[in-house]
Amino acid sequence: NCEDYPIHSFGKVILCGDTGSGKTTLAQAIEYYSKSRFGKGKPHDVIHPGPVKLLTAGIVPHLIKNEEMNMMLFDLAGHHTYYSSHCAVLEAISLSPSTFLILVNLLLDFEDINKQLYYWSGMIGDVCHRCPQQSSVVVVGTHSDGITDREQLESLCAALKKAARNAIKKHTFTDFAALNATAFNGEEMEKFVSLLCKTNNSVIANYPAISLNTHMMYAFLNDKVHQNEILLSQLLTLLREEEPKFLPTESTEVSPLLKTLSIKGLIVFFNDTMAENSWIVIHPEVLLEKVNGVLFAPSSFVEYLPIASNTGVIPVVLLKEYFPAPTYNADMIIQFLQLFELCVQITLNNVDTNMAPELPPNALSTDNIGSLLFFPACIRVDRPAKVIIPSCVFVWQICTASISQFFSPRCLHVLISRLADHFALLGVKPSSIPELDRYNRRCSVWCKGIHWMTENAVMIVVEMKDDFRCLSCTIDTSDRSSPKYLLSVITFVKEVCNEFCPSVPLVELISCPPEATSDNMPTTVELSLLKEVAKTKANKLIDSTGEKQVMISKWKKVEPQLFDLIGVDKNKNEADTCVPAKRPRLDSNEDCSEPRLADLLNDIASTIPAKWRDIGINLGLSSGILDNIQNQNAGKTDASIRSFEQIFSMWKEQSPRPYTWKTIIDVLKTSTVNENDLATRMASKYIIEN
């Protein structure tokens, strides 16, 4: 009955954070607390959850059931090799709102903690973008016992609470809590669990009503299905044999019930277009912890199995050896991996003979053609030496608009597999260029990119750069069809970015040839600005660095095809007018616009590096904070830039002074800073006078 299986009250709680932040310790403490609090009276004064397994592999689910909190708690491994598979799983279970706990280690530098907050909040925004309701986020600072000064701890917690509120925009930031690393006193845990229960219940209140049929289906799966996984067709047969009350027996009626249970995280349901191919996994830990934890484990983990080559190719025969029947069902595992786009099936023709030593002999036999799986997330090699970028190239980049935002590894890995499938593995036409037969159905892949050649021997390279902040597409321009081909690749890349990083604002940049720049050196220009300016009579604009002039008329002579592609008349641009790199804002409060950190560092920090302390004081930061910044960066080669970066971040998060261009320009004009010329340039560049 419903009392035995109260799934209407179950919520999803997801623990995320970097390695060493204390996720597993907290998960075990919550589980221990829930049992002691509601099963054996009040908890002890100090809760020791017991020995904790270091280096969590995959996703470890904890089912917590008691009178006050019912939840599926998911402990996410903190190692970066799992981030891509984490996103794939969370996308499937985040069609309804969840409670996310972002754990950060309070003993780290403030800037490192801030970067983690932005990374994980960005990931939450990406995986939850299809959920119609907002999820709730609680930030937990761990290792608070390492800060003995109570006043310092309270000041840090207040700053992090403000930083979390700035970072978490797409969902509801609930609160910040500081906890010990290894032991939890009863009062501390009572307060935290109360916050967790309140947040979880608030999220559950937004869930759609759960039907009686869904309750009964969950009971049936637990009571009548004796294996861990079952095909939908087999379940329908079992339902017809058992004839339970309130349960349908047709796939069109059963599938929605299973989907609801899967969204709540209680089971995993792979809904295939053909019912006989749809799998139901009743205990998700088999997939999330055992399979996912092993396949993507780094070599330093005990779970690591050397089944993937350096290029991410895993033979199905090896997969079946390491996940043998009857404990595992290889067909179900492969469907799970392919459905979540964690791998794609390839043939022997796709595998370079240079990879042969890394694969078992039977995997490359003709009997096993078509039985290889390609896992982009398992690639361990850097760009191959044979991938040489020619001198005559065109480069298009799509970058995050903020230095605190990132592309997800999930986006990169799906992009690599889709580019290989749609472009790189199409092959060349042997009759067209016979000498290129060696490239037929071949491409080079590495941990952050992919390279292939078209049928006309045009080279394409797509690569992630700048610490996952920039995707670059490079194409050889020696062939006249290159720009048009690149446009199709660019469109494809943008579609993947919008699909998997929908919460990240993006900016497109294109390379400008040296012949069109003021110093005869290549540079980049914002594409939207180029399109706008190229339609006018202006002949010059400032590049994305804000330092170089670009002559559009010269650019059009060098790359006329580019302007044809963006739909610009090549006969315009005769007036000697220069347009700034920054697009003018049209609102009347231009002087209140927020500056980008990258612009502050490029235009101010690099210009007056020695005046970071004077600027910090005028921005309202205390001498104590500035002393800490100086001590942290002492002896570093880029100490002033690091100091400026911390100052500008703290100004935005902690200072009472408004985070606007007007504020920084006023600071430059003060008697202590005394940089009036620089202030004038910044006002001219970023502020439109009314």
Image (cartoon, helix red, strand yellow):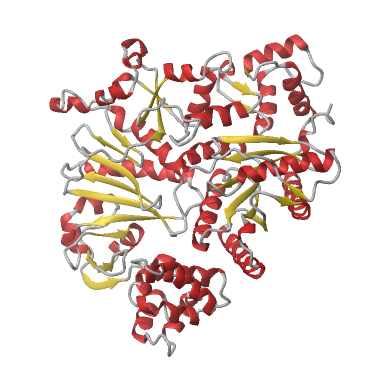
Q: Nearer the viewer, residue 270 or 433?
A: 270
Residue 358 lies in what quarter of the image? Answer: top left
Q: Nearer the viewer, residue 392 or 645?
A: 645
In the rendered view, would you say 568 is above or below 413?
Answer: below
In the picture provided, is 24 more to the left or to the right than 651? right
- State the image coordinates of residue 350 (x, y, percent, origin top left): 30, 24
Name the residue rendered at 53%, 32% in the picture.
293
Instruction: Tell me the quarter of the image containing the N terminus.
Output: top right
In the picture provided, is 360 more to the left or to the right than 233? left
Give the residue at the far left of this rendering.
435
Give the residue at the far right of this rendering.
41
Name the residue rendered at 73%, 11% in the picture.
240
Instruction: Tell me the quarter of the image containing the C terminus.
Output: bottom left
Residue 526 lies in what quarter of the image? Answer: bottom left
Q: How many marks?
A: 0
Name the residue rendered at 35%, 67% in the picture.
638
Q: Nearer the viewer, residue 553 or 597?
A: 597
- State the image coordinates of residue 390 (x, y, percent, origin top left): 17, 45
In the picture provided, is 466 more to the left or to the right than 96? left
Q: Is residue 100 visible?
A: yes
In the rendered view, would you say 146 is above or below 295?
Answer: below
- State the image coordinates of residue 544 (x, y, percent, origin top left): 32, 63
